[in-house]
Amino acid sequence: MFTSLEIFRMAFDMATHASARQSVIARNIANADTPGYKARDLPSFAETYDDFTGELSLRTSRAGHLTSDQTPAAEIMRDVPSSPNGNSVSIETEMAKATEAKGRHETALAIYKSALDILRTSIGRG
C-alpha cells in the first residue's frame, strides 16, 4: 500500500537539489577573486524535476578522496557581466542565491515532515 509515495520522493529530490545548488554557490563565492572565473548555477528544481534522479555526486580532487568522480548534473554558466579581470561572480548575488537555496531546502523538509505527520495520523500513530 505505501510502497511508492511520490510526495516523499519529491521532497527528497527537492532537498538534494537545494544542497547541490548550495555547493555550486559556495564554489562561486570561493572563486570570487579568481581571474576569468565564470559564475555557475543549476537550473531550477521545477525545470529538472522530471529528469531528476536524486543521486548527485561530488568530484574527487585526488585518488581516495571520495568514492565518486561525477559532478552535479546540469550545471550552467550564468550570463552576467564580468569585472575587468573576467570574473563574473557578484558576492551580493551569490548571497541572495544562497538564501534562496536555504529556503528551498527548508521547504523540502517542511513538505517531508507534513507528509510524514499525515501518514502517521492515517495509520493511527499521530
Image (tube, rainbow, N blue to C red):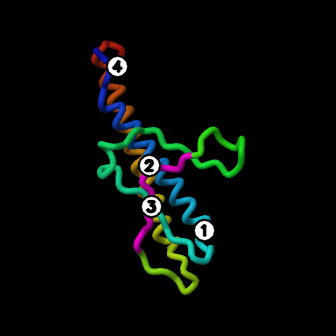
**Which numbered dot is residue 120?**
4
Badges 1 and 2: C-beta atoms under 8 Å apart?
no
What is the number of callouts on the image? 4
Mark 1 or mark 2, which is nearer to you? Answer: 1
Q: Position of residue 109 (x, y in %)?
A: 41, 39
Label located before the other in sequence (1 or 4): 1
Report the amino acid beneath label 4: Arg
Is 40 situated above or below 79?
Answer: above
Quadrant in which residue 42 is drawn: bottom left
Q: Position of residue 97 (x, y in %)?
A: 44, 62
Q: CA distance from mark 1 to mark 4?
A: 45 Å
Label located before the other in sequence (3 or 4): 3
Q: Secondary structure at mark 1?
A: loop
Q: CA distance from mark 4 to mark 2?
A: 26 Å
Q: Residue at x 58, y 83 (%)?
A: 85
Label located before the other in sequence (4 or 2): 2
Report the amino acid beneath label 2: Ala
